[in-house]
Image (tube, helix red, strand yellow):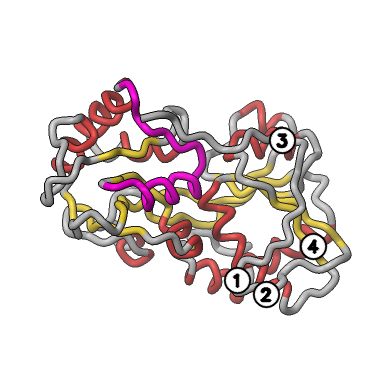
Amino acid sequence: MGHVTGILLSPFSLILLNLLFFAGTPIALAGDTIRINGSGSGLEMMKPLIEGYGKTSRGVSFIMEKPLGSSGAIKALLAGAIDIVVTSKPLKPEEIARGGKLRYFGKTPLAIVTGKNVPLKAISSKELEDTYSGKTTKWPNGETIRIILRPNEDIDTYILKGLSPGMDEAVTKAQRRQGMIIAVTDPESNEVVSKTIGGIGASGLTGVIVGKVPLNILALNGVMPSRKTLADGTYPLAKNINFVTTGKLPHAATKFLAFIYSDKGRAIAEKAGVLITADGK
């Protein structure tokens, strides 16, 4: 199996999207422009937030290209190419030194997902370790298991490895095997898992909910990923969703961030599968 890769975009080549995300409803209007990028799961969360903001704030448009990932988007932010980054990673000391300011918001479960064709509703940590290590190669219906990996340096890979020492070893083995499918972004991974017979991967829950790609979400050790199970500590895999800006944040972007942290914005994010952990101040 070959590698699956996305379109390679320069951090400076931002694409103006029409943002017709839901039933053809336009949610970007002419006027002040807000430039956003970041992690794939974070950008999925932004779609209903942008739509909600557009219903009350006229004269605002949004520029949002395919996800550059947290690191790539922060580079673009510090170069002045975008205004707001939605990130799953903490800032590095050198990024802080260059003016990056991180603002906490929330987190979403990192769900274990398969295509709808996989006859499975739950998986244990041990079964997941055996799947990724290659010890288990078939699903219960006899179909070959096909793992969709993320790049080794991706935050989802680190989160999966952190599940257990056995999972750390299993993911490392999977990364080293020849012919594995590697999806670069969150939306790309979800699309490939859904279309690959026997496919399995991991996804931020908000990306599954908002992206509406047909995926089977598995319970892990008997616990379904949700805001509730993340909050009570019974679900172990969490992906941060925070914001990074600089001191040069335009007024329009400042107002949009205020909306995101408002009761209305937080409610929209919660509906998209985000557990809000910030106090909103």
Disc 2 to disc 3, how far (Cα)?
28 Å
Disc 4 to disc 3, how far (Cα)?
19 Å
| Residue under numbered circle 2 | 25
Q: Earlier in the sequence, mark 2 or mark 3?
A: 3
Residue 28 visible to the viewer: yes
Q: Is residue 245 found inside the magenta-colored segment of the image?
A: no
The residue nearer to you, when weighing 87 against 175, is 175
Measured from the top left, where is residue 127 in percent x and y? 15, 43
Residue 275 visible to the viewer: no
Q: Earlier in the sequence, mark 4 or mark 3?
A: 3
Disc 3 to disc 1, how far (Cα)?
26 Å
Q: Which region shows up in magenta?
A: 178-197
Q: Disc 2 vs disc 1: Cβ atoms closer than 8 Å?
A: yes
| Residue under numbered circle 4 | 61
| Residue under numbered circle 3 | 11
In the rendered view, does 6 fall on the left or right side of 59?
A: left
Q: Residues within 10 Å of mark 1 (few under 14, many from 20)?
A: few
Q: Residues within 10 Å of mark 2 (few under 14, many from 20)?
A: few
Give above or below for 78 relative to 278: above
Q: Amino acid at mark 3?
A: Pro
Location of the C terminus (image quadrant): bottom right
Q: Disc 3 vs disc 1: Cβ atoms closer than 8 Å?
A: no
Q: Disc 2 vs disc 3: Cβ atoms closer than 8 Å?
A: no
Measured from the top left, where is residue 260 in percent x and y? 64, 65
Q: Amino acid at mark 2?
A: Thr
Q: Is residue 192 found inside the magenta-colored segment of the image?
A: yes
In the rendered view, does 175 fall on the left or right side of 151?
A: left
Which one is in front in this view, the residue at disc 2 or the one at disc 3?
2
